[in-house]
Amino acid sequence: MVSESPAVPEERPPKPRPAPHPDPDSAVYWSAAHDGRLVVQRCDSCGAKQLYPRDHCVVCRGPVSWIDASGEATVYSFTVIRQNHSRPFRDLIPYVVALVDLKEGPRVMTNIVDCDPDTVHIGMKVRATFETVSEEAGIALFTPVTS
């Protein structure tokens, strides 16, 4: 009796990155990223800049306004993810998860993209780039600055 080999499942197309669910405090941020802009909050009272979005300043509890950021940053810390079986991340392996210090001051978690993960290093200059993930949101990713 000849046994047939089991059917090989078809390759599934990559799943898009998960989309955020904007709330009243973060909707401006996600909308700006959708439009290819990086924004941070600046306190109207003390001038402190912050990101992640909040309804008040974390320094003095004053009111905040949104301002455009330069998109320039420096890698503070990072790790290279080489194993992740969850869709969509398995299609991105290997990928870099990093903390970057924005020129404006806030430190944010992101991915470093468009480079060999083994070339990423602490102190690396990076610049924001954006990926649309839904009709109402984009996400800021960072790519190395080339001389």
Image (spheres, rainbow, N blue to C red):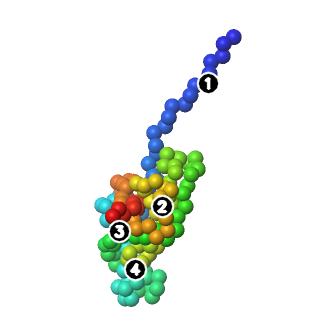
First in sequence: mark 4 vs mark 2: 4
Q: Classify 53 as above or below 86.
A: below
Report x, y in % for residue 127: 37, 65
Tell me the element at label 4. strand
First in sequence: mark 2 vs mark 3: 3
First in sequence: mark 4 vs mark 3: 4
Q: Which amino acid does label 4 sit on?
A: Lys
Disc 3, disc 1: CB below 8 Å?
no
Res 125 visible:
yes
Which mark is on residue 120?
2
The residue that label 4 is drawn on is 49
Res 51 visible:
no
Q: What residue type is labelled 2?
A: Val
First in sequence: mark 1 vs mark 2: 1
Count all numbered tags in the image, as a single digit. 4
Res 135 quadrant in image: bottom left
